[in-house]
């Protein structure tokens, strides 16, 4: 069998994603809820705020594809998000919050 990774578009609640995402760089990650830094890429729970990670996103998908495939295999419940989509959605949410009364 020849397994591939493909994009799937699904409607999400941005607040839910923002509260449960692991934001990954090349070597370490941080919690999107409390911004704890230096987390391991295979973390499933934030050691600081104890938030379970349901979503994971990488700042650079191309260089991290082997890691993404490994994470999907080890934790099939984890949803991989496109970082640009994540940033746009959370940025729009912040902009909306600025204009609320």
Image (spheres, rainbow, N blue to C red):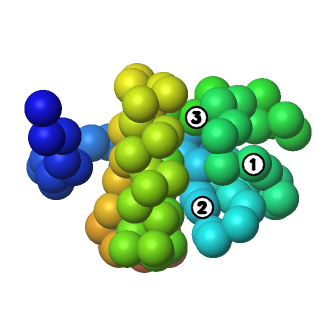
Location of residue 24 by image quarter? bottom right
Disc 2 packing (10 Å; few <14; some 14–19; many ≥20)? many
The tally of labels here is 3
Disc 1 packing (10 Å; few <14; some 14–19; many ≥20)? some
Pick the front one: 31 or 4: 4
Location of residue 47 by image quarter? top right
Q: Residue at x 37, y 74 (%)?
A: 62
Q: Which residue is mark 2?
A: 24
Disc 3 and disc 2 in contact, CB within 8 angstroms = no
Q: CA distance from mark 1 to mark 3?
A: 12 Å
Q: Where residue 59 appears, x then y in whole percent?
A: 50, 73
Q: What label sits on residue 2 in the rendered view?
A: none
Q: Where residue 85 appears, x then y in whole percent?
A: 30, 67
**Position of residue 43 in the picture relative to residue 73 (left or right):** right
Q: Which residue is mark 1?
A: 40
Q: Which residue is mark 3?
A: 53
Foreground mark, 1 or 3, reads 1
């Amino acid at each position: 069998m020849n397994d591939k990774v493909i994009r799937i578009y699904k409607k999400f609640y941005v607040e839910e994603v923002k509260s449960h995402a692991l934001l990954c760089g090349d070597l370490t990650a941080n919690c999107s809820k409390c911004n704890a830094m230096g987390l391991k890429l295979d973390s499933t729970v934030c050691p600081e705020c104890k938030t379970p990670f349901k979503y994971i996103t990488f700042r650079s998908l191309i260089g991290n594809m082997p890691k993404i495939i490994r994470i999907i295999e080890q934790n099939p419940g984890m949803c991989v998000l496109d970082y640009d989509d994540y940033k746009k959605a959370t940025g729009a949410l912040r902009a909306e919050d600025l204009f609320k009364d």
